[in-house]
Structures are given as C-alpha cells and as structure tokens.
Amino acid sequence: MSPFLPLLGDKRTSNAPIVGGYQSLREDLARRSPDRFVPLILIKENVCRLLEARLKEDGFNVLNSGRVIYFPSHGRQKDFHRQFAAVLESLRR
C-alpha cells in the first residue's frame, strides 16, 4: 500500500481538516457563544457524522439529533430541503 493518500476521493484525507480543525472551531464557537446556547445545525454528511457528538459533548446546542443533512449541490437540493425541514420541524414538537 502506498504511503501517499490522494487528496481527493479518500475520506481519510478529506476528513482530516475537519477533525484536525476541531479545536479551533470549538474555541471560535465558544468565543461567539460563551454560554453555548446558540443553536447549531450541521450541514454536510461528513461534518454531521464527525462533529455532532463532539460538539454536544462539549456542551454546544446542536439541533441535528443524529440527522444527516446533505450539502445542497450535485442534485442534492431536494434532499437538503427535506432534511433541513425535518430538523426545524423537530423543534416544534
């Protein structure tokens, strides 16, 4: 196996900046919302999967509740609208 990972198409590589930048993201969000009350909705499948649990563990108000919201490009616009609406609808209950 090659020691070099392709920059595109390999989830380990494309997820690395998300995982590696978590500390900076957490600090930035904490600065903007010190009480961590501001609601967050995560968008993009890998962002949802990689960050929702970590943000919740760190006390942030993530509204996804395990729901993935696809990024609205490449034919995913209808999925995005349906998924985003489901998160908003869950707040009304």
Image: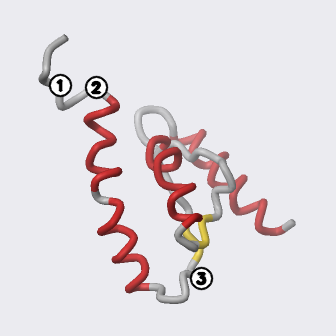
Closer to the N terminus: mark 1 or mark 3? Answer: 1
Q: 8 above or below 89?
A: above
Q: Give the numbered dot on residue 37.
A: 3
User: Disc 2 designates what residue?
Assistant: 9
Q: Give how far apart the Cα atoms at labels 1 and 3 are.
A: 39 Å
Q: Secondary structure at mark 1?
A: loop
Which of 33/1 is in front?
1
From the viewer's perspective, tell me whether residue 8 is left or right of residue 87. Answer: left
Residue kind at label 3, given as amino acid type: Phe
Which of 70/78 is in front?
70
User: Disc 1 designates what residue?
Assistant: 6
Residue 34: % across, % down: 47, 88
Q: Are marks 2 and 1 in contact (CB under 8 Å)?
A: yes
Residue 77: % across, % down: 52, 42
Closer to the N terminus: mark 2 or mark 3? Answer: 2
Residue kind at label 2, given as amino acid type: Gly
- Residue lying at the far right of the rendered structure: 93
Instruction: For the N terminus, give its image quadrant.
Output: top left
